[in-house]
Image (tube, coloured by chain):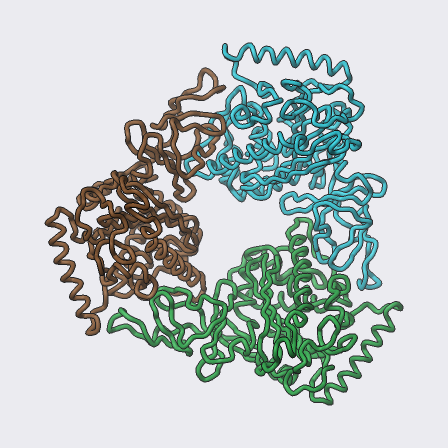
Chain colours: A cyan, B green, C brown
């Protein structure tokens, strides 16, 4: 891999316990490196099975300069291809979502079936070899209905470990029996790592997220012990233990798994109790959808969170799922794509109200976007220098940065 | 000429029969090279004599970073100058079209006559030498009323061959007796070569251009022989022979001339019959202007097309002319400037309806713009690789690319 | 300082009496150099004391990639800091103007007092050293109420000479007793040096500034002697002598001071008579504000102008002050920030009409913006070459360029 000396030195000189140096947020060379090493060689979360319930349903997603089309084939498998015709190179699918019988290039009608095989064209002569002009495929990983893709020829094998560990947590929520009722595409004016770092701590929650902190306990992200908060923190720990025991007895795995650094496919999970009514991440902490997921009857299942590196997080409640993918646009702009899922048999107006379902995370995303933008502005200043992380509330930010720098280092040689 | 090694290798490694590699459509270095070698040293079509009918009439045109002012002088000659004051360097003419007595700089009123000579200024002192501060002139080539400019000190001499060959075709249509009744400036979100390649084939027409294929035969661009289309293709060939004989007898040259590669100033021409009523490129193939061009009385003169390298194409019918110049904006954006001409004595509302006159090519331009944008998006993907051209319908695309690569190679040494 | 060879040669090859070569207006490398050497190491004018009358009042200003917050502290001193939190680097103040008790980071509520000292945060542990996390301060220079900042560690010492020379001129106008009644932020589509060069001559005024030349004499910027204008120029000189004598007798210093090149902090001043009613830079040359500045009773105090290098000019009349700061955005865009001040006790609608107060310079700014844009377009052309300055009307443009090139040369070694 071609890396300039100053960037190589920055990667090797990373100081633990501190923010990353400014070029990691601003330099075009490091952005290109991120797109190559991080987004080009790791498992990237892009959507859910209910985005494409029927054969021929597809969605497109941009990973750096690559456009990928994710499609359900006639055998109900999820497949992914580079969204580029093998003739003159036109982009094949130019809408974000749609449904097709075959994939037909709008330019000269070269036609590919849903397995990516070129099956028809005209005027190419008797000797034209169809077999050499299939669509270029992209690896797909399916974790209980969460769809990941990997652009590398040899995708990281430890996806299977993540799947084995996580399926028992996620499968009970029944993603395949859900529908996506809202997608919110929001551009944050900052580097994608600022988006991730912001997601990995709740130090900022109490002052910035009035809607989110209606239902979640900020203690879940770590708090400095002090006489003032000792009782509340202790109470939260005891609550976790009680609820974990209850949920595990009901077959819902809840214990924390943290496999963040020291591996290729980093992830973490934990099911946490919710505040107040304790049912869901809504303004009053009650369910947003009367028709519960899967075969649930208990509304108080807390929030199962699942964080992946480099680009996603997800919250599974008894009544709905919220799922986030982070898609870099350039060094200083990042798309955050949020989807809300409810049971496919839930009826809008009767079982759920769309505004109520989405208000907490729509507000929270906007607030986080403003914080990311302030961080990007600061990183652009020549006066910026990496500051220290809180050992209590920012340990997971530190772990994200450790993983990130580890992955770059592994690619250096 | 300074060219990086990777770009030099790309130029030398061009594989015949296939699309150009992606950097030719996306790389800033190659765009700069195109502006220097192709647009800086070849004859570039920029407009028509009727754009500037009277002395002092001018229009400006941007060729890369250079702004050029094309003006009719007091002796009715067409002249062109760099649009930059010789004092503080301000741009002189800041409108696209206008009419002036002299060219006066808006900044400090330095005044140039229509031959580019500085004739007046103030406060410059007794010793100021006016003769050393004329406008910098640009070469002009006038082909029967089509205006070309060349930024090079020594413009390609084979413009004269093109003129000698083409004047007998074009002159009968009487450009000088026309008026420009519509100009449409449309930006395509793609590299200029994608615009040209798209123009050099009609493989895409049948599925993308319902308006255009109302009157033109797609067979004109080559078709793979097959039992299914054998009769139609054969019929078209016979039609051409019959109509050519009729037109040539009437003094209208019609035979194909193809002088595309192996030379500096590449061009091609052909007069082709039109479908249906056979009169003009309109929705019903009837004339759009009742007042015919020149001294024509026969409405059925087909369409005389003239294609030049690197940046133009033109269609001459019995009743109107449509003429296109392609002007790169940056590596990924291109201005397509379309002008419609009718006889200068034609009266709007009586002889022609502007909407009807322009509807076919306005629609076609938008459709082509969408195709060019899809091609640009595809070329931006790391998965793009050059695909094969149809030997039947894309031979002229191949010839355009051959010419282009030849011209870069000639500049390499 | 890292400078490429071509740029170094351009700096060393500067030809006196001529415009700067095009890369000084267009090249990203030279823009970066300007931001480092000129805007990073000189005194930059950013605002006036009345922008922040009370403790806790602040404004922010962007100097290249650095955002600076200028604040009045509890002891009424003006202080400036880099607008970047020492924790995660978020931008602290995200509005252009405001008022605060302490400076609190919106991200995690790290709290700094108005002297920049970190006084509070949470969750950082027992060993956290507050004293090492103060805001980074920026030097402030206060010239009779005009606020300058300098980003360098060692700011140029000759600011004190400028202050000593200029305070007697400016102090009588009583800036501290004024209020800012209008701020106009206007982006000119040109390099910042074109904005400055345009400001340093009035050769362009007669044809471009009908509003401004209602009250100012263009002769003030130099005129080629000629039989046609001899009488007018002579009359203007005599007028200056008479008025200077009158103003100096009243305690208002008026004589020209020119300390432009050969020094680090270049400046020039002069009090000039105004035309017609002679009172103020308004359309009828009468005062725009009936409540005069300071303790003035004489309306006819002409216009005291003060020009600084690299980025400001100011006009002080008997009734109001207009003050301009030039803030580069990128190589081809520049913010011109104009503020109008009147006595703080003046009442809108009674003493002044805001539209009348601001109309001359709002119009003049727009006209200058158009000229700067034309100049930028010309400089972008490959045909641009430096032209000669008028020895009569452009001597101060030449001196600005001399100073600029001197400062770059001084930084080269």
The location of residue A392, given as percent across then percent down, is 53, 19
Q: Is C354 positioned to the left or the right of A197 in the image?
A: left
Q: Which residue: 81% across, 77% down?
A: B237
Estimate the x, y position of residue A393 in percent, counting from the top left.
54, 21
Residue at image point 67% right, 36% down: A42
The residue under the point 39% across, 24% down is C118
Q: Is residue A38 visible?
A: no
Where's the N terminus of chain A, which quadrant? top right
State how many labels appear.
0
Q: With respect to residue C385, does A399 lie above or below?
A: above
Query: Foreground residue, C256 or C381?
Result: C256
- Image quarter (top left, top right, bottom left or bottom right) of the C terminus of chain A: top right
Q: From where the camera sits, is residue C296 visible?
A: yes
Q: Is residue A253 above or below residue C389?
A: above
B338 relative position to C182: left or right = right
In the image, farthest residue toward the front: C350
* Image coords of residue C389 (percent x, y): 30, 64
Residue toward you, C193 or C153: C193
The answer to which image quadrant residue A281 occupies is top right
- Rendering quarter of residue A29: top right
Query: Looking at the picture, does residue C100 appear above or below residue B140?
Result: above
Q: Is residue B62 left or right of residue C303?
A: right
Q: Is residue C370 above or below residue B249?
A: above
Q: Residue A151's quadrant in the figure? A: top right
Q: Position of residue A386 (x, y in %)?
A: 47, 31
In-front residue for pair C364/C79: C364
Q: Nearer the viewer, residue B190 or A210?
A: A210
């Amino acid at each position: 891999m071609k890396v300039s000396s100053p960037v190589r030195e920055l990667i090797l000189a990373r100081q633990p316990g501190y923010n990353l140096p400014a070029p990691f947020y601003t330099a075009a060379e490091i952005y290109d490196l991120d797109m190559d090493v991080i987004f080009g060689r790791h498992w990237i979360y892009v959507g859910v099975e209910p985005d494409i319930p029927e054969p021929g349903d597809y969605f497109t997603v941009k990973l750096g300069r690559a456009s990928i089309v994710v499609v359900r084939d006639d055998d109900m498998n999820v497949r992914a291809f580079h969204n580029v015709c093998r003739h003159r190179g036109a982009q094949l699918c130019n809408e974000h979502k749609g449904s097709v019988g075959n994939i037909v290039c709008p330019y000269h009608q070269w036609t590919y079936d849903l397995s990516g095989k070129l099956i028809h064209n005209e005027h190419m002569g008797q000797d034209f070899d169809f077999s050499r002009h299939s669509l270029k495929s992209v690896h797909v990983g399916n974790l209980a209905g969460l769809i990941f893709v990997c652009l590398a020829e040899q995708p990281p094998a430890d996806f299977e470990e993540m799947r084995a560990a996580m399926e028992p947590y996620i499968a009970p929520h029944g993603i395949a029996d859900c529908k996506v009722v809202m997608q919110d595409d929001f551009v944050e004016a900052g580097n994608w790592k600022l988006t991730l770092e912001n997601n990995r701590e709740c130090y900022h929650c109490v002052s910035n997220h009035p809607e989110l902190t209606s239902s979640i306990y900020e203690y879940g992200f770590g708090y400095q012990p002090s006489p003032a908060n000792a009782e509340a923190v202790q109470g939260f720990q005891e609550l976790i233990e009680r609820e974990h025991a209850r949920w595990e007895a009901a077959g819902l795995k809840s214990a924390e798994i943290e496999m963040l650094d020291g591996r290729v496919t980093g992830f973490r999970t934990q099911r946490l109790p919710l505040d107040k009514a304790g049912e869901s991440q809504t303004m009053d902490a009650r369910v947003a959808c009367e028709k519960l997921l899967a075969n649930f009857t208990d509304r108080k299942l807390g929030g199962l969170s699942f964080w992946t590196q480099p680009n996603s997080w997800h919250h599974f409640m008894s009544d709905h799922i919220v799922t986030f993918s982070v898609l870099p646009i350039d060094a200083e702009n990042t798309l955050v794509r949020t989807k809300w899922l409810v049971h496919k048999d839930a009826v809008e107006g009767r079982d759920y109200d769309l505004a109520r379902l989405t208000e907490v995370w729509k507000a929270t995303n906007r607030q986080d976007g403003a914080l990311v933008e302030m961080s990007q502005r600061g990183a652009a200043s020549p006066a910026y220098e990496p500051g220290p992380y809180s050992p209590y509330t920012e340990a997971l930010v530190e772990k994200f940065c450790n993983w990130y720098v580890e992955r770059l280092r592994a690619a250096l040689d």
